[in-house]
Amino acid sequence: MPYRETAERPKLAPEERRFFTKRDDVEKGPFERGALLRAIRAGKLHRATLVRAEDESEWRPLSYVKQIDAEVAPAPKVEFDAARHLLHDEDSGSFGKGIVIGLLGGCGGWILAEIFAKGRETKRGARIGFVVQLVGGIFLRLVLGKP
């Protein structure tokens, strides 16, 4: 491993910085920021690859270099709350469309149960289930949603 002095190095402006990479005690570089970005995108370097700026003496994972990581980091995961979206988002459609879609789905299930059910009690259960779904859906919409 090459000898490195631990003395203070003069700081460079972010756009002037070049970086060295290190893998298996083999150092390469210096590389400009753009070259590192291309290597990452091509899969030749990873966010865990050790790097150091030419004005620094410490090695660190590439993901710790903010000016590079910001351009290659995966987009933050956005949590999607389906219930909130469906009940409160004005752009998600209209109340009437929701009623029609729910009614069609419930009717479709009821009709399938009437066609394929073997016993009288099963068909009766499908009818009761449809009514419960209809009443429950309207109740939830009125209580939780914006009518």
Image (cartoon, rainbow, N blue to C red):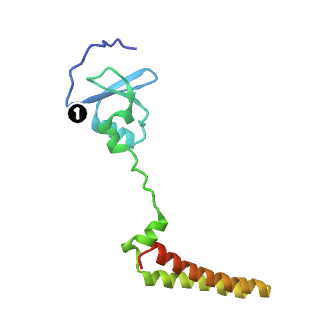
- Quadrant containing the N terminus is top left
72 or 23, nearer to the observer: 72
Q: Residue at x 42, y 55 (%)?
A: 78
Indicate left or right for 17 with 92 as reference.
left
Vertical placement of residue 82 versus 108, above or below: above
87 or 97, nearer to the observer: 87
Q: Residue at x 30, y 29 (%)?
A: 19
> Residue 49 location in percent, x, y?
42, 31
Secondary element type, mark 1: helix
Say which residue label 1 marks.
Answer: 14
- Residue 5: tell me if it is visible: yes
The picture quadrant where one finds residue 59 is: top left
Amino acid type shown at disc 1: Pro
- Quadrant containing the C terminus is bottom left
Q: Residue at x 48, y 75 (%)?
A: 143
> Residue 77 location in percent, x, y?
43, 52
> Residue 114 location in percent, x, y?
71, 87
Indicate left or right for 126 with 35 as reference.
right
111 or 89, nearer to the observer: 89
123 or 133, nearer to the observer: 133
